[in-house]
Amino acid sequence: MNIHEYQAKELLAKFGIGIPTGYPATTVEEAVEAAGKLPGPLYVVKAQIHAGGRGKGKFKELGADAKGGVRLAKSVDDVRADAADMLGNTLVTIQTGDEGKQVNRLYVTDGVDIAQEYYLSMVIDRETSRVAMIVSTEGGMDIEDVAHNTPEKIATITIDPATGFMPHHGRAVGNALKLEGALAKAASKLAKQLYTAFTALDCEMLEINPLVETEAGELLVLDTKMSFDGNALYRHPDVAAMRDESEEDPAEVEASKHDLAYIKLDGSIGCMVNGAGLAMATMDIIKLNGAFPANFLDVGGGATTEKVTAAFKIILSDPAVEGILVNIFGGIMRCDTIAEGIVAAAKEVDLDVPLVVRLEGTNVQQGKDILANSGLPIIPADDLGDAAKKIVAQVKKAA
């Protein structure tokens, strides 16, 4: 789960981490009111969307010369004008794709006199089961470009959760940022605070870009992104309450309500599979046969009729879907139960695209009999290769 910048900063502040003063706003008047609470005379007005590259982004509804989603305002009147420009308009960034995201929230913060910008992030290193702290002197830039062009400017410090953050980790962060004296100590302290926040909140990713050194010699978190392990949200109801469903794909939101793992893709063949590995293999073999999957959808090992029906509805909510491939291995769940769910779901959603079903596993023959006797135009397949060839052929024939 992702959250907005202002929410992430609220969480970090609880761990004693320094952030510029700021206030969220959903209307122009709230933005002006927020600016009135700040000392000025420099303000920063930031669009709040779940995507990076906001400063370089462009608004669809505004001219090509219009400013992006992060703006410096030199007066309260400028804040008002910027807020009116942004709210309700669509911001397109390198991470949103051409469709962009509508800006419904702003974050108005105090201006900062910046002396130097740095980069610091944390992710889980799944190869070592440790926390990787990634540090660079090249903050405020696209870290992907830095990694590609000047990888020597990025340092990775791994932290074993069994021992936690140690003093030598803090010194390594200060050295990587080329800091000395009081600033090096401040960086060490900040890194420990961030690690504490990362582990305490069950984060998957915590990125600070930029982390800034001010003219007054302080280290402040100027911008941050946080994402969380969805399986651990039950431990953090305060974090779960920060979820903004308007920033998510509606189909993915609906899928989460039925405990379905769904991700929309750009192809035309909808997939319904039980098991993540089998789903990946199914998508691969669709591509091998010359088509592209429209989604990743894992119904899990305990698929019920209700769950299968919900899955069909979600797949068909995508207008790009021209055919559906169901690939089920009946291990925990029996094939006859799955077949009954497929028949009931196909009848309920009034299926109007080709449907190919491959079943294998427990009670497979009973399952195939149920599909054959359903009276529905369900196309059976003997194996995964056969299934992929049949659905691709059906979609191409319909085109």
Image (spheres, helix red, strand yellow):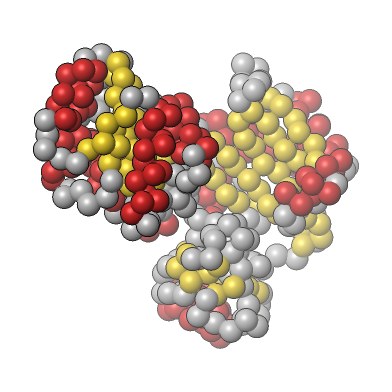
Of the pair 264 and 282, the residue shown nearer to us: 282
Q: Residue at x 81, y 32 (%)?
A: 172
Q: Quadrant of residue 339?
A: top left
Residue 314 at least partly seen = no
Q: Is residue 49 above or below residue 45?
A: above
Of the pair 200 and 297, the residue shown nearer to us: 297
**Left or right: where 102 falls relative to 333:** right
Q: Residue at x 61, y 25 (%)?
A: 126
Q: Quadrant of residue 306?
A: top left
**Left or right: where 254 falls relative to 89:** left
Q: Quadrant of residue 158?
A: top right
Q: Position of residue 326 (x, y in %)?
A: 31, 34
Q: How many marks?
A: 0
Q: Residue at x 83, y 42 (%)?
A: 151
Q: Position of residue 243 (x, y in %)?
A: 39, 49
Of the pair 204 and 387, the residue shown nearer to us: 387
Residue 224 at least partly seen = yes
Q: Position of residue 299 (x, y in %)?
A: 31, 32
Of the pair 262 and 289, the residue shown nearer to us: 289
Q: Quadrant of the N terminus?
A: top left
Q: Quadrant of the C terminus?
A: bottom left
Q: Position of residue 317 (x, y in %)?
A: 29, 54
